[in-house]
Image: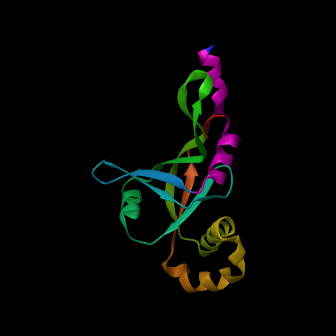
Amino acid sequence: MREMRKAKRQRDAGWALEVFDKAPYITVSMTRHDGTPYGLPLSVVRKDERTFYFHCAYEGEKVDCLRVNPVVSMSAVSRCTPRFEEEKSNFTEHYRSAVAVGKAEEVTDDLEKVMALRLLCERFLPDYMDRFDEAVQRSLSRTMIVRITLTEPPVGKCKD
């Protein structure tokens, strides 16, 4: 019985992708040059079933990590609600989460960079799209775009 309940909580890749789409940020974890883990919450946007983007400066710890080892893990929580279940006298948490593994690489094509920045702006600041072109002209050359291509299907879990 317990295994049946557990199985019902695992969700397919499409469901997991929706969790990524709804999460306010996605934690991207990578490996430092000395082998220690490094993870940080980023504003990430999804283009399709396998492709995600984020932007950053051309220097910094995450860029150093990705140059040494481009394999990343992404995790997201789109809902998390702590609960006390009176009938069981139990503390629990209801959640929707997803994880995925992929390979990160710098985008060098300006058209793809602009497309990724447009997706990011449409997701996080849609009310300011009228200022997008001007901002991209001003900052494209100093903005690094990183593409994450999933190397396996994402996995989602929930407790509703």
Name the image quarter holding the C terminus: top right
| 146 or 86, nearer to the observer | 86
Segment tinted magenta in the rendering: 2-24
State how many labels appear: 0
Horizontal arrangement in the rendering, residue 100 relative to residue 68 (left or right) = right
Horizontal arrangement in the rendering, residue 33 relative to residue 151 (left or right) = left
Q: Report which quarter residue 87 is drawn in.
A: top right
Type of secondary structure dominating the magenta stretch: helix
Identify which residue is drawn at 58% across, 61% down. 53
Considering only vertical position in the picture, is 35 above or below 66?
A: above
Q: Report which quarter residue 52 is drawn in.
A: bottom right
Extreme top residue here?
Answer: 1
Considering only vertical position in the picture, is 98 above or below 28?
A: above
Colouring style = rainbow
Where residue 74 appears, x then y in whole percent? 52, 48
Considering only vertical position in the picture, is 92 above or below 127?
A: above
Q: Report which quarter residue 157 is drawn in.
A: top right
Where residue 118 appears, x then y in whole percent? 66, 71
Where residue 126 appears, x then y in whole percent? 70, 71
Where residue 17 appears, x then y in whole percent? 66, 46
Identify which residue is drawn at 60% across, 27% down. 86
Identify which residue is drawn at 67% across, 83% down. 131
Inspect the magenta stretch and tell me whether residue 140 lies in it: no
Horizontal arrangement in the rendering, residue 25 relative to residue 21 (left or right) = left
Identify which residue is drawn at 66% across, 52% down. 22
Name the image quarter holding the N terminus: top right
| 26 or 68, nearer to the observer | 26
Inspect the magenta stretch and tell me whether residue 20 lies in it: yes
